[in-house]
Image (tube, rainbow, N blue to C red):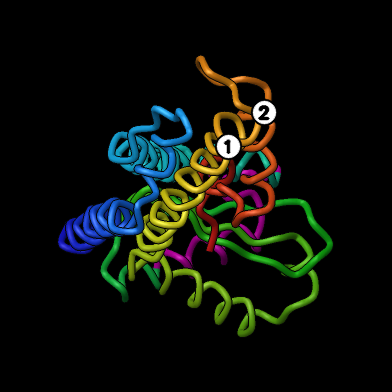
Amino acid sequence: MKRIFLFLMTNIAIMLVLSVTLRLLGVDSILAENGSDLNIQSLVILSGVIGFGGSFISLFISKWMAKRMTGAVVIKEPVNNVDKWLISTVEKQAKIVGIKMPEVAIFPSDQMNAFATGASKNSALVAVSQGLLDNMAQGEIEAVLGHEMSHVANGDMVTLTLIQGVVNTFVVFLARLVGHVVDRVILKNERGHGIGYFVTVMISQVVLPPVSGLLSPQLI
């Protein structure tokens, strides 16, 4: 909770600094002189809500999305020695780091890969690829699982989500600011937002760092 509180306070501070800086630079005055009715403070708040809202929604549904994107199958009842060993190893590591037993899954991929995700360290998913199981020794697999479990125990999924929220806020704000300037100042649209605004916003969100928190789960 302390980490979430500090990141939220940081984002609020960034939004305030951004709003004050734009006012000091006279951006709102320049827009007003060109017939623009953009409310920078409202846009900053909207950007923060969209930026963090998208990141947290992505975090809360991350396990569901990860399973469907990778085809991961959760081991509910071990059916072979590999399944039993995986469950036993993760259970042992969970006790060592002091967290609840996460879901354990295997996903179909020839590449040697693994990931962890979930809304909290006590509601996580740890998954390994079939390629990793086929090409690594047990000691190596155990080390990989330990790495993923350390991410879970440290709450790195939440940290990444909060950082992504800050990035999203800037992307959403800048994209809409540029779109508004193009639509009202350059194209001289006088009412509402025209096609120039929407096209510019879409292009800006591709050119600027992508708003990945709105589209993908937090995988580590």
Say whether marks 1 and 2 touch (CB < 8 Å): yes
Residue underneath mark 2: 196
Local crowd size for mark 2, using a 10 Å CA cut-off: few (<14), some (14–19), many (≥20): some
Work out how far the residue at label 1 is from the one at label 2, CA to CA, in angstroms. 7 Å
SS class of the residue under badge 1? helix
Where residue 143 sits, quadrant-wise, is: bottom right
Instruction: Find residue 183 and report its image quarter.
Output: top right
Picture residue at 45% right of the left edge, 53% below the top: 170
Q: Which residue is mark 1?
A: 179
Q: Residue at x 40, y 52 (%)?
A: 165
Task: Report the side of 9 relative to 162 (left or right).
Answer: left
The answer to which of 100 and 187 lies nearer the viewer is: 187
| Residue 66 at x, y percent in the picture | 59, 45
Extent of the magenta region? 71-91
- Mark yes or no: residue 62 visible: no
Near-viewer residue (145 or 169): 169
Q: Residue furthest bottom?
A: 139
Question: Quadrant where the N terminus lies?
Answer: bottom left
Q: Is residue 40 left or right of residue 110?
A: left
For residue 104, say whether it is visible: yes
Residue 9 placement (x, y as % from top left): 19, 57
Q: Label 1 is placed on what type of residue? A: Gly
The residue under label 2 is which amino acid type? Gly
Q: Is residue 78 magenta?
A: yes
Q: Position of residue 103 (x, y in %)?
A: 47, 50
Nearer to me, 163 or 107? 163
Q: Is residue 217 shown above or below 88?
A: above
Q: Is residue 141 left or right of residue 40?
A: right
Q: Residues within 10 Å of mark 1 (few under 14, many from 20)?
A: many
Residue extending furthest toward the top: 191
